């Protein structure tokens, strides 16, 4: 038996379809047959071979231990079809979403249940071969979270875009109906955050995006207002006018120098800024002002296995408005990556083998 995998063979070049033998699970491993795999914006960084740190500095994936050929895809939903000799045999046939942010299992972070903080991670789709394939190996069945009657496409994107939004929201201060939260970037992850915020908090949500179509989508997802951030000065003025002052928090799902600097400029006393986006750049921060104004700047990167379980439970309640999801054939992956690069994707695209 053979499987198809779409792999990076050269950075920034089209993925190549290759055929391999279906892997055999060993030890506690389980083999998941892929039903759906989301295409994430962070895949573009992997595809290019580096992350931009700003100031001309980059992190090379080769320097971090990446080897080619490599199969991306970390938003995977599917069924367990085979297990290793040390795995739970009764898990065969179970449908679930794969938690990809897997650590070494031995360090203090992993033992605390914070595997995404592990310095020697085994992340599926970024360190280990992922779901742009017919099958994917998972180290243990506990990383395959049952999703019940959820649409497998929605379950798949919960592993990253949904989890990233959910975990960022969990880092917010306690909010009331008098508070405003600004969500910068109304793409797939930003829309997920708006939908979740509208159901998990009573705060008023302001969405910011340069695209009018995405701003309209944000209103449909639950934002009370949407503003353009094409002009930094106008964005700040418009947002403060809506808030009647400064927002309680800003979540930046873009992560450029411009969005980071304007997010910081929006904050008043006690304001909380959460940075999620990875476009890259640098911001200038007055150290003394952080203390004098009690400002918090916090990074947020995906989430924990427990948070994924919580998120799946929230989604199963059916109260959260799902973001737009388009399904494409796995064979169209290069077209999808090109569309994502050019900013032509509204919501999320999920590949089906």
Image: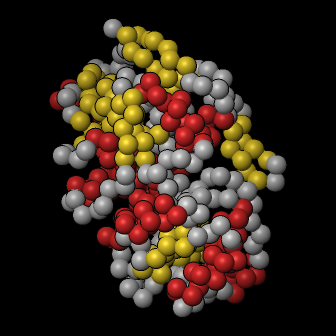
Choose between 294 and 134: the one closer to the eye: 134
Taking the spot 82% from the left edge, 49% from the top edge, the residue there is 56
Q: Is residue 25 visible?
A: yes
Determine which quarter of the picture holds residue 341.
Answer: top right
Left or right of 152 in this view: 225: right
Left or right of 238 in this view: 315: left
**Image coords of residue 110 (percent x, y):** 46, 46
**Image coords of residue 311 (percent x, y):** 32, 56
Taking the spot 60% from the left edge, 44% from the top edge, the residue there is 342
Left or right of 223 in this view: 256: right
Residue 276 drawn above or below residue 150: below
Choose between 155 and 325: the one closer to the eye: 325
The extreme top residue here reads 1
Taking the spot 59% from the left edge, 58% from the top edge, the residue there is 254
**Image coords of residue 60 (percent x, y):** 71, 37
Choose between 116 and 347: the one closer to the eye: 347
**Image coords of residue 196 (percent x, y):** 36, 65
């Amino acid at each position: 038996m053979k499987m198809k995998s779409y792999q990076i063979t050269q950075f920034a070049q089209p993925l190549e379809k290759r055929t391999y033998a279906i892997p055999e699970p060993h030890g506690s491993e389980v083999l998941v047959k892929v039903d759906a795999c989301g295409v994430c914006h962070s895949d573009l960084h992997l595809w290019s071979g580096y992350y931009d740190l700003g100031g001309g500095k980059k992190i090379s994936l080769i320097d971090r231990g990446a080897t080619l050929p490599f199969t991306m895809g970390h938003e995977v939903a599917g069924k367990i079809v085979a297990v290793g000799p040390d795995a739970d045999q009764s898990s065969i046939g179970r449908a679930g979403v794969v938690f990809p942010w897997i650590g070494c299992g031995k360090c203090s972070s992993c033992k605390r249940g914070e595997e995404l903080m592990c310095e020697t991670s085994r992340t599926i789709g970024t360190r280990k071969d992922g779901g742009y394939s017919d099958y994917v190996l998972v180290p243990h069945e506990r990383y395959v979270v049952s999703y019940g009657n959820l649409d497998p496409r929605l379950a798949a994107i919960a592993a990253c875009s949904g989890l990233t939004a959910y975990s960022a929201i969990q880092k917010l201060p306690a909010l009331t109906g008098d508070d405003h939260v600004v969500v910068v970037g109304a793409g797939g992850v930003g829309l997920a955050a708006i939908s979740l915020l509208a159901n998990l908090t009573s705060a008023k949500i302001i969405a910011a995006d340069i695209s009018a179509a995405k701003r309209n989508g944000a209103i449909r997802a639950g934002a009370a207002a949407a503003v353009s951030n094409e002009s930094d000065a106008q964005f700040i003025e418009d947002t403060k006018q809506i808030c009647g002052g400064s927002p309680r928090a800003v979540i930046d799902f873009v992560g450029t120098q411009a969005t980071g600097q304007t997010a910081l400029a929006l904050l008043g006393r006690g304001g909380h800024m959460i940075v999620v986006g990875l476009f890259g750049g640098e911001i200038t921060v007055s150290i003394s002002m952080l203390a004098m104004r009690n400002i918090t700047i916090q990074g947020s990167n995906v989430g924990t296995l427990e948070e994924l379980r919580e998120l799946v439970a929230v989604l199963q309640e059916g109260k959260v408005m799902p973001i737009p999801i388009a399904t494409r054939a796995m064979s169209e992956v290069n077209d999808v990556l090109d569309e994502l690069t050019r900013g032509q994707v509204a919501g999320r695209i999920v590949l089906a083998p």
